[in-house]
Amino acid sequence: MNSIRTTPTLHDVAIQSGVSTATVSRCLNFPEQVSDKTREKVMRAVDALGYSPNFGARVMASQRTNTIGAIIPTMENAVFARGIQAFQEELNAHGYTLLVASSSYRSDLEEQQVRSLVARGADALLLIGHDRNPSIYEFLNAQKVPCLVTWAFDASAGRPSVGFDNRLAMRNMAKVVLNHGHRKLALISADVAANDRARARLDGMRDALAEAGLDAGSLVVIETPYGIDSGARAFEKLMQAHDRPTAVFCGNDVLAVGAVGKAREMGLGVPEDVSIIGFDDIELARVAYPKLTTVHVPHREMGRRAARALVDTLKTGEPVEPQELAADLRLRESHGPVPKGR
């Protein structure tokens, strides 16, 4: 006689684990609200029975998918990887699943991805930087999907952000270098027109120059794609100029490592002949030779706080409270006094 295999239900899990169906539901959807002992008991029953939650039924009942989307500019940059990892870990602790998309720094693609993630039921979105068509925010408001901006902080932007002040961080770093006697500065940057973080860092350098009584317009800027080779080529171009800079700032550590490598190839000492400064403080900055002076971005803390902020707004319906984090300076070996005679 053939037995018919029945699909285990939430009620079956409750009976086997000796708790109520409400507790089982809470354990599966909001594990942080359940004690470790109860959660272990419920999960043993889930494994033993082979129970799988009915996702469709949950969505219909709650009008929530317990998924949050994040759109990052690129998956090639370790900066975003570290922050998104912390973001996902925090979401998972609260019973949420993360969906990630990469826009390749294309505003048209980002807009498509926003609409696609909302269509797939994302309860909220994490976006990088403030620069985008206002129609995207209008769309999200109409769909009642909260969004949060990170990797930037701007209290005047009209939308919540959990991040740091790129302009202030770069201004502080430039002031340190200027105090070492440098007057001929250059910046290797990402495209500033389509990247508000890069634009803010450029503005920060100009602020520091102006505060020092120098011509902010004298700053030499080369815009280039992200990459070690790109940083190397841009640095070589700067050093081939007749009046070459004594300090080269880079919009991220990857560009800076490319610049350091090219300096060695050209027979230039760092920082004896030229100071090179990065931004982000990824692991690469600490293993480079010489170790990079750079701005430390609180990637993981930013990811954790952004996740908690979105989870809280989904639970309470209250707007996200903006949070500004500090971006500290890491003064290492790649910067020094202005070379003699310069």
Image (cartoon, grey):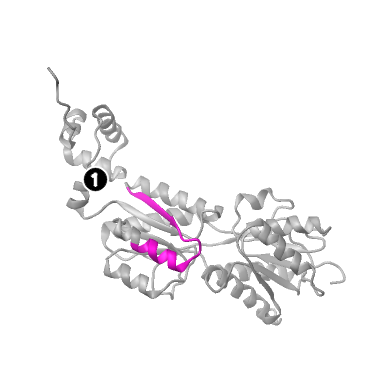
Seen from this angle, which residue lies furthest right?
A: 341
Q: Position of residue 185 (x, y in %)?
A: 72, 72
Q: Is residue 107 magenta?
A: yes
Q: Amino acid at mark 1?
A: Phe
The residue indicated by pointer 1 is: 55
Q: Is residue 161 magenta?
A: no
Furthest toward the top, the residue is: 1
Q: Judge left or right: residue 339 versus residue 317.
A: right
- In the rendered image, residue 110, in percent from the top left (x then y), is placed at 43, 64
Residue occupying image coordinates x 68% and y 81%:
217
- Position of 250 compared to 90: left or right? right
> Could you tell me which secondary element the residue under label 1 belongs to?
helix
- Front-most of 179 and 199? 199
Which residue does the image show at 68% across and 61% down from the upper left? 231
Q: Could you tell me which residue is drawn at 64 percent across and 73 percent down? A: 205
**Vertical order, 128 against 99 (above or below):** below
Q: Quadrant of residue 101?
A: bottom left
Q: Which residues are magenta?
A: 96-115
Image x and y of residue 337, in percent = 79, 65
Q: Residue furthest left?
A: 1
Residue at x 33%, y 48% (from the top left corner):
94
Does residue 203 appear anywhere in the picture? yes
